[in-house]
Image: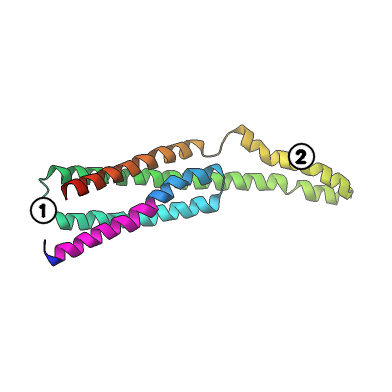
Amino acid sequence: MSTSDRILLLLHIGFAIFTLGPLTAATMSTPRYIRKRDVVVVRYLHRTTQIYGIGTLGIFLIGLGLAKGDLAEVWLTVSMTLFVVALVLLLIIERDQRKAAHLLEVAAAGAKPAAVPARPAAEEAGEGAAEAKAEEPAAGGATAEPVTAGEIAQVERGRLAAMSGVVALIWLVILVLMVWNG
């Protein structure tokens, strides 16, 4: 193995470590924050998925450089095919993250106006502080109503959990193929 091949191999391994780890962590933790309805974190994880998903293309391109056109090896063909499948799944994951973040924002925007007018209406009518406090549970009940109606982005959360697990398994299979045959 020449020096340039060793440098390419180090870059290939480095890209794999520093992109696939954060990418897998971001995709696998997204369902938890959808369940918690933390739209800020879901947006952050979506952006992380986009950035590191693009970074994974470096792994693929450097791997092609290492192959030097010798793509007749079965393990290389299988690895590249699995990598392309993982990239397609990552596009679907990215879409579901974006959709879940949008649904969480819409739900949060819909819940805030219902809770805000209840308090000023009580104060404008000249009612006492005790009566205004008595109305607060009603406002809290209005914001809790969408929770009982069903989970927000439940379909996206399930798809994200399933597909991120499949993508992680694909990364592991590719790793085994690289180590076994490399």
Q: Position of residue 139 (x, y in %)?
A: 74, 42
Q: Position of residue 118 (x, y in %)?
A: 77, 46
Magenta-span inclusion, residue 43: no
Looking at this rendering, what residue extends furthest in the top direction? 149
Q: Which residues are magenta?
A: 4-23
Magenta-span inclusion, residue 11: yes
Mark 2–mark 1 distance (CA, rounded to whole Å): 69 Å
Query: Which residue is at 46% across, 52% downward?
Result: 45
* Mark 1 crowdedness (10 Å alpha carbons): few <14, some 14-19, many ≥20: few
Mark closer to the chain start, 2 or 1: 1
Query: Which residue is at 28% across, 60% downward?
Result: 14
Residue annotated with mark 2: 138
* Mark 2 crowdedness (10 Å alpha carbons): few <14, some 14-19, many ≥20: few
Q: Is residue 143 left or right of 71 when viewed as pictured?
A: right
Which of these two is toward me, 105 or 1?
Answer: 1
Residue annotated with mark 1: 69
Three-letter code, disc 2:
Ala
Looking at this rendering, what residue extends furthest in the front direction? 180
Secondary structure, mark 1, is loop
Which SS does the magenta portion mostly show?
helix
- Where residue 74 sits, quadrant-wise, is top left
The quadrant of the picture occupied by the N terminus is bottom left
Q: Position of residue 26 (x, y in %)?
A: 43, 50
Q: Is residue 1 left or right of 92 when viewed as pictured?
A: left
